[in-house]
Image: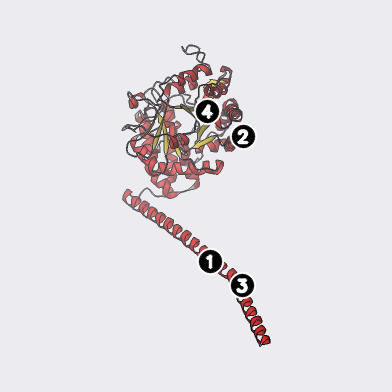
């Protein structure tokens, strides 16, 4: 039986303000509050709220038949908390239906998986805790920023305990294979991979309202018929996109929400079901390992990381930022940690790209890639100075690594002690319960003994009387 896995990403960049060279050392606030509020409120009104409302109606109408998955970046959640809390409230209502799954992803929506394992693990853990706080369940499947994946990253994700991961069904990786199967990580077979169907996903998110597209207009029954006509053994159809595709990339005037609303009924007629990523990972066996030695993503035609690290400016900014990753982790300063999350966001590096792209790129306040690079490096210069003031730059890497090892060992020791304390507490509770049970049994024993003594006395008296 064919199943559709429908997933939406929710992420919102924290816009940086115009920051001059002479601001370094004097101004430690880097953000354009007006633009942040304006942009998130605009997206919430034109996309998130109408789209989530329709998805809720689809669940209410179809019961447990229709299911959907979301991933929210931590920095995106922070923007929603401040400026559009109604979106989070709507997501919590959707969560109550039991037909929604929330996935893990890096809190910062950054690129740490490419360069620093510890930072990547900490970033994911922080986001998982945020998701659990809002929706009451820890994610079991991970979706990396922009579906970034490689064999090495898969190994890291498996080591974190995740059972599945979402990534791109890129042609240069699949070759003759189809994205309509479940695969597994090449170096960690226990990690299952769900691959995005590029064509079916982009037909909705990129081409739906394009009147020059040969497939225009796209109707729900036509779309489902294409899925139903796939070979019988190709049963997993992964349709992944940003939630902002419903309302922003494809305006509401294009009837995109009416198209979405009609999908479940058309799918049901063809015997096609909907499943969440975790359900698919549990019920479907992998058909084999997927070999991905080089990093891939869902961006641009190359499906690689060149839109973030393709030129010298981007690589300079990227390497400069992550040169202080370990110092940031050791300093553990709340304000520095918040700025660290915002500065890691992949959008900051995307603004510096010099690549032509089929997808329009809004650079915001920046006139060109060089302007974006200059502004970011000014901010980064001030940020690194603040980090070094907390953890002096004079301390060399060997001493830094030694301190990190000590901190890790202390953490492991504390964890072991916590487990031992928990074990002893459980043992103590059992002993106390046994003692209480014993105390409760003693009075009963006394009463029984008393009854036996009384009966003996009566028997003796009777015998003496008869004698």
Residue at horizontal 65%, vertical 79%?
Answer: 454
Mark 2 or mark 3, earlier in chain: 2
Mark 3 or mark 1, earlier in chain: 1
The numbered mark at residue 270 is none
Quadrant of the image occupied by residue 370: top left
Mark 4 or mark 2, earlier in chain: 2
Packing grade of label 2 (10 A; few <14, some 14-19, many >=20) is some
Which numbered disc, 1 or 4, marks the residue closer to the eye? Answer: 1
Reading the image, the residue beneath label 3 is 443
Residue 383 in picture, x, y percent from top left:
44, 41
Reading the image, the residue beneath label 1 is 434
Q: Helix, strand, or loop for circle 3?
A: helix
Residue 308 in picture, x, y percent from top left:
39, 30
Up/down of 359 relative to 10, above or below: above
Instruction: Estimate the spatial distance between the alpha carbons at disc 4 and disc 3, rounded to whole Å.
Output: 68 Å
Residue 226 in picture, x, y percent from top left:
46, 18
Instruction: Estimate the spatial distance between the alpha carbons at disc 3 and disc 1, rounded to whole Å.
Output: 15 Å
Residue 7 in picture, x, y percent from top left:
49, 30
Instruction: Estimate the spatial distance between the alpha carbons at disc 1 and disc 4, rounded to whole Å.
Output: 56 Å
Q: Does residue 182 appear left or right of residue 68 in this picture?
A: left
Q: Helix, strand, or loop for circle 1?
A: helix
Give yes or no for contact between labels 3 and 1 (Cβ–Cβ under 8 Å): no
Reading the image, the residue beneath label 4 is 243
Which numbered disc, 2 or 3, marks the residue closer to the eye? Answer: 3
Q: Helix, strand, or loop for circle 4?
A: helix
Reading the image, the residue beneath label 2 is 86
Q: Helix, strand, or loop for circle 2?
A: helix
Instruction: Estimate the spatial distance between the alpha carbons at disc 4 and disc 2, rounded to whole Å.
Output: 16 Å
Packing grade of label 3 (10 A; few <14, some 14-19, many >=20) is few
Q: Quadrant of the C terminus?
A: bottom right
């Amino acid at each position: 039986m064919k199943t559709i896995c429908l997933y939406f990403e929710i992420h919102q960049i924290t816009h940086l303000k115009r920051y001059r060279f002479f601001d370094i050392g004097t101004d430690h606030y880097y953000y354009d509050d007006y633009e942040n509020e304006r942009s998130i409120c605009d997206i919430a009104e034109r996309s998130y709220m109408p789209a989530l409302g329709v998805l809720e109606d689809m669940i209410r109408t179809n019961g447990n038949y229709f299911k959907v998955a979301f991933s929210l970046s931590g920095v995106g959640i922070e923007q929603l908390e401040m400026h559009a809390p109604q979106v989070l409230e709507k997501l919590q209502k959707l969560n109550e239906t039991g037909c929604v799954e929330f996935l893990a992803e890096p809190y910062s929506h950054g690129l740490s998986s490419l360069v620093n394992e510890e930072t990547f693990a900490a970033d994911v853990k922080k986001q998982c805790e945020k998701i659990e706080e809002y929706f009451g369940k820890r994610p079991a499947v991970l979706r990396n920023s922009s579906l970034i994946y490689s064999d090495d990253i898969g190994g890291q994700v498996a080591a974190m305990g995740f059972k599945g991961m979402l990534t791109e069904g890129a042609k240069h990786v699949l070759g003759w294979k189809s994205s309509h199967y479940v695969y597994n990580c090449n170096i960690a077979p226990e990690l299952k991979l769900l691959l995005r169907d590029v064509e079916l996903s982009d037909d909705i998110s990129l081409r739906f309202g394009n009147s020059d597209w040969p497939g225009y207009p796209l109707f729900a029954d036509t779309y489902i018929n294409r899925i139903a006509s796939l070979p019988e053994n190709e049963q997993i159809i992964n349709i992944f996109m940003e939630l902002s595709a419903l309302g922003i990339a494809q305006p509401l005037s294009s009837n995109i929400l009416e198209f979405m609303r009609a999908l479940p009924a058309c799918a049901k007629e063809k015997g096609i079901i909907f499943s969440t990523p975790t359900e698919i990972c549990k019920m479907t066996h992998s058909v084999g390992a997927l070999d991905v030695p080089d990093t891939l993503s869902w961006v641009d035609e190359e499906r690689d990381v060149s839109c973030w690290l393709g030129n010298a400016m981007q690589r300079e900014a990227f390497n400069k930022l992550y040169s202080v990753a370990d110092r940031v982790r050791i300093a553990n300063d709340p304000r520095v940690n918040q700025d660290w999350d915002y500065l890691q966001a992949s959008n900051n590096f995307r603004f510096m790209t010099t690549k032509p792209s089929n997808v329009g790129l809004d650079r915001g306040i920046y006139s060109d890639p060089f302007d974006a690079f200059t502004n970011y490096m000014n901010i980064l210069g001030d940020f690194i100075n603040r980090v070094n003031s907390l953890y002096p730059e004079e301390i060399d890497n060997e001493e830094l690594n030694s301190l990190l090892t000590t901190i890790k060992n202390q953490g492991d020791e504390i964890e072991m002690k916590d487990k031992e304390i928990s074990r002893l507490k459980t043992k103590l509770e059992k002993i106390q319960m046994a003692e209480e049970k014993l105390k409760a049994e003693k009075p009963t024993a006394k009463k029984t003994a008393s009854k036996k003594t009384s009966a003996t006395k009566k028997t003796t008296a009777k015998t003496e009387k008869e004698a």
